[in-house]
Amino acid sequence: MAYLDRDGVRISYQTFGPPPGDVTPLLLTHGFSASSAMWQPNIEALSAARPVITWDLRGHGSSDAPDDLARYSAEACVADMAALLDACGIARVVAGGLSLGGFLSLEFYLAHPDRVAGLVLCDTGPGYRRDEARQQWNDRAVAIAEGLERDSARGLALAARGMLTQRDARVIDALPAITIPALVLVGARDKAYLGAAEYMAARLPRASYTVIPDAGHVCNVDQPDLFSQQVLAFLDQPDLPAQGQEARPL
């Protein structure tokens, strides 16, 4: 495990597989309240032929949990992701993530489109267009934070308040303009996200969509072999540009 200092906040990360070369690396971002350990069932398969980077979000796993709520935001996480790529000497990745990690992968693309060759979006959604629906989501996030505070899990509580809550419709409105290849995966038993996954797949111009049978919200853990097979097939497609190539326009 390695650490990156981000203005006094240590971000933990790990690299697997061959060193960076022509093959585009895969950056994996975990979901809320999890850690990079959630990808362990998939690492051997995914890193056999390409570099894979996993990391812990602020307030999670082995990364630091600062006391200041202002240090927790989607913008801070996106900046952490860019800094991780810089530290690893990587220009561009396939950005993959589950739940919150998938949403942050979309955020990362919007902030750094030149650094993302493809997207792997697992058991996640694009946010909300309507203010009322977004407020309901945020109310649930705050309730989660209050429960975590009662359990003395301050870092996760701050992450819920600062990173899990959403502020606008920017991501969902941007979906039709995201023209890089995307893989949308969702567990068949993940009822809370089946609709969101189908919505994203319909609006991302170059998306492929797979429902993984007998899997819930953490489809990569519930069905690790099926998950890895789907991701590897996506990564091996000819439309996915290598490190030194320009993305093919629509």
Image: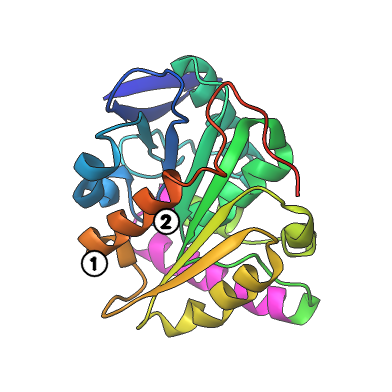
Residue pictured at 58% horizontal, 21% vertical = 244
Which amino acid does the dot numbered 2 rest on?
A: Gly
Give x and y (percent) for residue 135. Answer: 70, 75
**Place of residue 192 in the rendered image (x, y in percent of width and height, measured from the top left):** 48, 81
* Position in image of residue 200 (x %, y %): 63, 69
Residue 138 in view in this figure: no
Between disc 2 and disc 1, the foreground one is: 1
What amino acid does circle 1 point to?
Gln
**Mark 1 neighbour class, 10 Å CA radius: few under 14, some 14 to 19, many 20 or more:** some
Q: Quadrant of residue 204?
A: bottom right
For this view, does 163 lie left or right of residue 21?
right
Taking the magenta stretch, the answer to whether it contains residue 232 is: no
Magenta segment boundaries in residue numbering: 133-156
Instruction: Identify the residue position indicated by label 1 in the image.
Output: 223
**Colour style of the rendered protein structure:** rainbow
Q: Is residue 114 left or right of residue 233?
A: right
* Secondary structure mainly formed by the magenta segment: helix
* Mark 2, residue position: 31
* Image quarter hosting the N terminus: top left
Using the image as rendered, state which of residue 157 and residue 52 is in the foreground.
52
> Dot 2 surroundings within 10 Å: few (below 14), some, or many (20 or more)?
many
SS assignment at label 1: loop
Residue 46 at x, y percent in the picture:
29, 42
Residue displayed at 29% across by 22% down: 18
Instruction: Classify residue 223 by image quadrant.
Output: bottom left
Label 2 to label 1, Cα distance in Å?
A: 17 Å
